[in-house]
Each structure stands twice: as structure tokens, then as C-alpha cells.
Amino acid sequence: EVQLLESGGGLVQPGGSLRLSCEASGFIFSNYAMSWVRQAPGKGLEWLSATTGSGGNTYYARSVRGRFTISRDNSKNTLYLQMHSLRAEDTAVYYCVKEDKSGYSSGVFEYWGQGTLVTVSS
Amino acid sequence: DIQMTQSPSTLSASVGDRVTITCRASQSISNWLAWYQQKPGKAPNLLIYRASTLQSGVPSRFSGSGSGTEFTLTISSLQPDDFATYYCQQYDSSPWTFGQGTKVKIK
């Protein structure tokens, strides 16, 4: 059974930093691209970033490019999202998502974690 | 970026009704379209990909159709478990983008 367990969310001040983690199990982690998708309170879904199975390629939405960094440690079956220069509009539930391909980000979000809430406020 | 527009934003229906949700893309995306279901407080769940391919385990009352810029999600006979919000999403070109969602409510 595929499981994705996010952690690291919480309250952070504007301009601050936070690192989210996503521990994966139930599949061969290094074989699949992974993404982060967020959802602001009461709003829709926004794709943020993706990384290929090897971690050799990364992709970002314009809204987070230069502020967020996606990475993965395949030896630990863990995906990360390092977030800097956080703004109030970054307040959202952040989902870790398993895609259905390995060598590239297909954009098909096959399995989702339960999400972790990030609140940016003073 | 490719804009995805769903209609309606909200619909009220009864158990047993046939329900259709429309999704339009701002440019042609071939059939690179997925549909997701999200219940309150839960993560989205993949229902359909490549516009019409049912994800494993998804009930056959769900179906998808369309290509190019216009797509539909149909629930043939609405069940109590289907009251939720539905999102379309294009994966033709990055950044991957979602529609704003359609909330299916109990009439």
C-alpha cells in the first residue's frame, strides 16, 4: 500500500523559512517522479514543484521559483521542500504527491499524502 | 500557462441523478487531462487520466470524455459517497494547472 506522510508544517513568520518532508513507503521510491501541490484555505489546487525519480531534474511553478527548492533522498525514501522568504499567500496545506512515471514529471498525480498545514503569519 | 475553467462551480443534485461537469482549456491539450475527487478535509483522489481512462478501483459510474479544449466528467448515477468537489487538471505542458473546482452538493 502506497503511503506518503508529510511533516514539517507549522506557523512561521513572513520572510521565514521552513522545510517540509515526505516519507514514502509501499513502492520503489526512486522509480517515480514526485511533486508538491498546495491548497490555500477554501481554495483550489496549485502545483508547485516536481522532481524526477533520480532527482536529476527539477521543475517549479513561477510563483515559487527561486524561493522553494525540491529535493529527495532516495536512500531514505524521503522527499523535501525547502521554503524561503515565505509570504502570507503561501499559507496552505501542502501535499506530497507520487506521480506515475520515473524519468520525467508526467503531471499525473497518482497518490497523495494527507497534507501538512503551513501558516505564514506574524 | 494553460488556464482551466470548470462549469458549473457548484451543482445541486439528488442520489441517482446523472451529473455532468465541464472543463475547458485555454488551448488544446490533446487528451492530457485528469479528474480528481476531493472530500472535505481529505486529499484529492485521482479518478480519470488521459481524459477517459478510469484509475484502478474507481467505480464505473464515473466516465470522462473529450479532447482538445473541451472535456466532461460524467457520473451516471450519483451515489451518497460522490458528494464532493471535483477538479480537472491538464498535464499537456508545465506548469500543470487545475480548474477551480466543481462542488457537487445534495439537493
Image: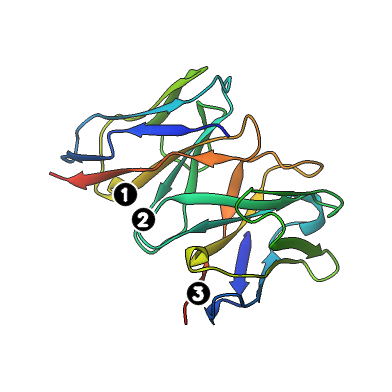
Same chain check for tags 1 and 2: yes
Task: Mark 2: give few (<14), some (14-19) or many (20+) Cα within 10 Å.
Answer: some
Query: Residue A66: x, y in percent?
Result: 72, 58
Q: Which mark is residue B15?
A: none
Task: Give the amino acid type for the residue marked by disc 3 in the picture.
Answer: Val
- Quarter of the view holding residue A55: bottom right
State the residue at coordinates (62%, 78%): A16
The quadrant in which the N terminus of chain B is found is top right
User: What distance separates the C-alpha of mark 3 from that of mark 1?
Assistant: 28 Å
Task: Give the amino acid type for the residue marked by disc 1 in the picture.
Answer: Ala
Question: Could you tell me which chain the residue with mark 2 belongs to?
Answer: B
Secondary structure state at the residue bearing disc 1: loop
Secondary structure state at the residue bearing disc 2: loop
Kindly check if marks 3 and 1 are in contact, taking CB atoms under 8 A apart as contact: no
**Residue B22 in the image: above or below residue B79:** above
User: Between tags 3 and 1, which lies in front?
Assistant: 3
- Quarter of the view holding residue B78: top left
Q: Which mark is residue B84?
A: 1
From the viewer's perspective, is A91 left or right of A20?
Answer: left
Query: Residue B96: x, y in percent?
Result: 60, 40
Query: Residue A102: x, y in percent?
Result: 78, 45
Task: Mark 1: give few (<14), some (14-19) or many (20+) Cα within 10 Å.
Answer: some
- Quarter of the view holding residue A36: bottom right
Residue position for label 3: A120
User: What distance separates the C-alpha of mark 2 from that of mark 3?
Assistant: 25 Å
**Residue A49 in the image: above or below residue B26:** below
The first of marks 1 and 2 along the sequence is 2
State the residue at coordinates (48%, 50%): A45
Task: Give the amino acid type for the residue marked by disc 2 in the picture.
Answer: Lys
From the viewer's perspective, is B81 left or right of B66?
Answer: left
Residue position for label 2: B39
State the residue at coordinates (77%, 66%): A77
